[in-house]
Amino acid sequence: MSGGDGSFSGAYAGDAEASESFLAAFDAGGERLIREVQSRTTFENARNTKELLAAHGLSNCALVTSAFHMPRSVALFRALDIPVIPWPADYRTSGKLGLGFDFTQPSLNAQLTTTAVREWIGLIGYYLTGRTASILPAP
C-alpha cells in the first residue's frame, strides 16, 4: 500500500493508512501488508513504491487508483520501469455518453471540471519535466 498524507497540514490519513484500516475490516491486514506512508505526490508514490518493491524482492504490483487518475499514475510507474496491472476505481460518470453539461447540477459540473483540469495539468507537467515519456500512456 503506497500513499502518505498529501495535504499541507499533514493532519490526514494517507492512502496507505486508510487502506490498511479498510482491509483490516476484512481480515486482510496486519503483517501481510507492506506500507509506504511518506509519499505526498503521485511521483513520490511511484518512486517510493519502486524502492519498496526492490527491498522486498517484488517486481510488479496492482495499481489501484481513481479512474480519472489512472493515466498519470500508469505513465509515472512505467517511466520508472515498474510493471503494473491498472485497476481503476471511483469512476466519476453516470454511464451516459454525450457532450455538454448537466445544468441541473452546476456544483457537480464544477467539481468534475476541476478534477479534469488538475489531471491534465499533471499529465502535461510530468511530461514537460521528463518524469513521463508521453502525455498519455498507451493502453
Image (spheres, rainbow, N blue to C red):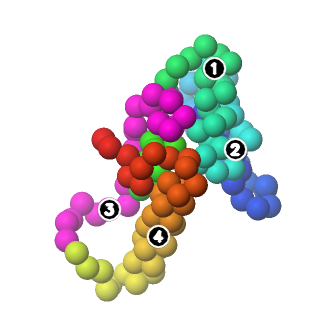
Residue type for callout 4: Val
Q: Residue at x 73, y 54 (%)?
A: 12
Residue 73, percent from left and from top: 49, 46
**Relative vertical location of residue 104 with respect to residue 96 in this rendering, above or below:** below
Residue type for callout 3: Thr
Per the rendering, the mark at residue 39 is 2
N-terminal-most mark, 2 or 4: 2
Which SS class for mark 3?
A: loop
Quadrant housing residue 52: top right
Q: Residue at x 42, y 54 (%)?
A: 135
N-terminal-most mark, 1 or 4: 1
Q: Which residues are magenta?
A: 77-98
* Residue 67 at least partly seen: no
Quadrant housing residue 94: bottom left
Which SS class for mark 4?
A: helix
Few, some or many residues within 10 Å of mark 4 (<14, 14–19, 20+): few
Which mark lies nearer to you, 4 or 3? 4
Gap between marks 4 and 3, in whole Å?
16 Å
